Amino acid sequence: MNYLSPSILSADFSRLGEQVKALDQAGAQYVHIDVMDGSFVPSISLGLPVISSIRPCTERIFDVHLMIEEPGRYVKEFAMAGADLITVHAEACRHLDRTVTAVRELGKKVGVALNPATDLSCLNYILPELDMVLLMTVNPGFGGQKFIPYTMEKIRALRRMVERRGLSTDIEVDGGVTLQNVEEVLLAGANVIVAGSAVFQGNLAENVSAFLEKMWR
Ligand code: DX5
Ligand code: ZN
């Protein structure tokens, strides 16, 4: 099953609640929420109070992407604020297993994110514990960047790894996904598609429908 996870990093924050409702009505299954701490990545985006205040706007899956150092310090707070799926960066966790286990014990789904240049081999032991792997296809920190071409092969390699091991791990692709390249990204093996600028630039409802049309499966 394929899922669309529009990234609210590209939303108009003055009308955030309204836009989250519009994503839901347009049929997007997830809401991708990018949390940045100004240390793991250069930007600072939004945090716990924003997540709590948009939680009543929709029952869709809150897909929280933590681009913060040592996210294990905060997973409980993000779970309480309304996250359904919590994704942490392998590069930001000194004790990745401990952090993954902490998310599972909170009863939430757990994902691990990898920066473009991080090798898939770091997933070797942890993969069976994960609901999802998020592959960054731009350097994290900003919306509206260009898809890094070599990451396409990385998506294929991860799909092979998941299948070889008989797992059903979701593969989320984040960064530079557009209506032009989404089919190639799906074909490479992704099944959760993040799109920020490509959803919020222009007509949100039309963009969501256009993505869903290409993702139908
Ligand atoms: C980047 C974030 C992305 C970002 C994607 O660090 O993790 O989720 O919002 O934006 P686009 O789709 O515009 O590349
Ligand atoms: Zn993201």
Image (spheres, helix red, strand yellow):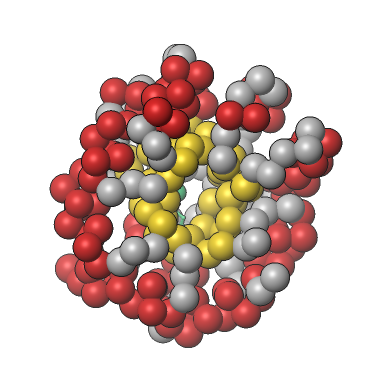
Where is residue 20 drawn, in percent x and y?
31, 69
- Screen quadrant of the C terminus: bottom right
Decide: is 134 above or below 207: above
Decide: is 111 above or below 69: below
Instruction: Name which residue lies at 51% across and 38% down.
Output: 111
Please identify the quarter of the rendering in which residue 14 is found: bottom left
Does residue 138 appear in this view? yes
Where is residue 161 drawn, in percent x and y?
77, 36
Please identify the quarter of the rendering in which residue 54 is found: bottom left
Where is residue 132 drawn, in percent x and y?
57, 42
**Closest to the observer: 40 or 73?**
73
- Specify the farthest residue to the top: 94
Please identify the quarter of the rendering in which residue 211 is found: bottom right
- Screen quadrant of the N terminus: bottom right
Instruction: Name which residue lies at 29% across and 23% down.
Output: 73
Horizontal arrangement in the rendering, residue 209 relative to residue 13 (left or right): right
Does residue 195 appear in this view? no
Decide: is 198 above or below 37: below
Instruction: Name which residue lies at 30% across and 66% down.
Output: 58
**Closest to the observer: 150 or 16?**
16
Where is residue 66 drawn, in percent x and y?
38, 38
Instruction: Name which residue lies at 65% across and 30% down.
Output: 128
Horizontal arrangement in the rendering, residue 68 relative to residue 171 (left or right): left
**Closest to the observer: 202 or 3?**
3
Horizontal arrangement in the rendering, residue 51 relative to residue 196 (left or right): left
Q: How many marks?
A: 0
**Closest to the observer: 174 or 167?**
167
